[in-house]
Amino acid sequence: VNGTMPDMMTDDEDKCWKQVLDGTARAYGRVVLCDNPFTGAMISLAMLIGSPLAWIVSLYCAALTNLTSKLIDLDQSMMRRGIFASNAVLVGAGLASYFAYEGVWGFLSLILVATLAAPVSLLAYLFTARILSPLGIPSLLFPYAGVMLFALLGGSYWKAAVPAPIEIVDASRFRFMEAAFKGMAQIFVVDNGFSGLLVFLGMLACSRILAAAAFVGSVLAALFALAFFGLPIELINAGLLGFNSALAVPALLYFLVPTKKSLLSCVLGLFMTLGSQVAFESLFLTWSIPAMVFPFCFAMLPFVALDLTSITGAEEPFVTLIPLAELSTPEEHIRRYNGGTEAGYEELPDVDDEEAALLKPIDDEQVDEGGDKDTDGKSEWVNV
């Protein structure tokens, strides 16, 4: 269950159900940058325990997105790796959690909206990747945030659904572990501490570094919010100030080569994410909608968009941005980029057969995360 488990993927076209199942499981893990089906299964279980309705709708949206990708003949290696459906997982969870549905007609409306939102999230991903990929920038969770923003803004006109109130438990003191694990659960719009623990354990199966970073990000965000922001302690205990940071800190150790100096980027990214969250919450309060993952996405842009090697011309920049084609796990990045100084690493020349197979070029009409066109008209689109 370690790493990305490429042996679990199948190319057998006669086992379509297995491809869709593996791609759907990996989609849950890819939300937290873990390309691992066991991670996805643990997160799926966490959602089932925390919010059965959110789990059902997210599973429906993810499966429908993968089937849509097969129907319109997109690159199936990307579907099997969970790339297409990762945003749909959160769209389904958001539709189930951010709205309250009244009666039978309300749940029929939920099914109808989810059926439409799933393929729309796929199109949003393809559109975002087409714009950002040539620049070497990952799409992060912008497709999910954009789709849900339109759904929330239009939700006031729905007859059978109303914005769901935030249910928090009154508290007179800060609860450390509750805030930490709920911060991880809130990534999937679930308010349950045990679900957050399962998310953490699932991430451990793929990458110890990512799991630890997510936990630390959630904890530090809660502590900083408690110390510097005049927010109700109930919101902090519920993890609502921690989930964006629980995404941001692992992202910085995923897209940057993990070094001592890159840890400084994590600290800066944590403060930028918290500041962005307060700003977006204030902005979106006008329309009474949550900020979702917009703080994470916008706070990460300066880090994943700037290649210091190209800008400064230095052979050993302060931090090294990993090319999108080489993203795997932080542990693999450390192994692959070793032999350098604290600031940068020298890439090992050898690439094993499994990695070479995953990095094979595909047709220019098929879209994935970042890659620049080569001279013969092909593109190497990268899977993030």
Image: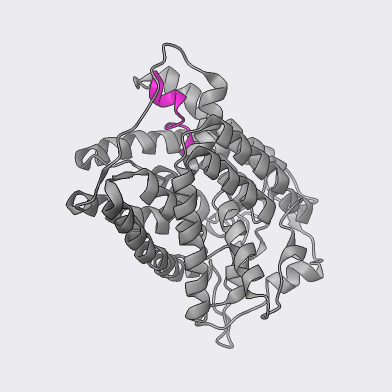
Q: Residue at x 80, y 71 (%)?
A: 353
Rendering quarter of residue 351: bottom right
**Residue 309 position (above or below residue 187):** below
Residue 227 x %, y %: 44, 18
Check the image and name the residue furthest to the top.
Answer: 172
Check the image and name the residue furthest to the bottom.
Answer: 376
Q: Judge whether residue 337 is colored magenta.
A: no
**Residue 113 position (above or below residue 271):** below
Number of numbered discs on residues: 0
Asked whether, in this view, residue 232 is left or right of residue 25, the answer is left
**Residue 339 position (above or below residue 176):** below
Quadrant in the picture for the C terminus: bottom right
Residue 143 x %, y %: 41, 59
State which region is magenta.
Answer: 233-243
| Camera sees residue 313 | yes
**Residue 5 position (above or below residue 273):** below
Asked whether, in this view, residue 64 is left or right of residue 19, the answer is left
The front one of 95 and 186 is 95
Residue 254 x %, y %: 62, 49
| Camera sees residue 317 | no
Residue 368 x %, y %: 53, 70
The front one of 227 and 75 is 75
The front one of 142 and 315 is 142
Judging from the image, the colouring scheme is one colour
Q: Residue at x 80, y 65 (%)?
A: 349
Q: Residue at x 66, y 44 (%)?
A: 202
Q: Judge whether residue 236 is colored magenta.
A: yes
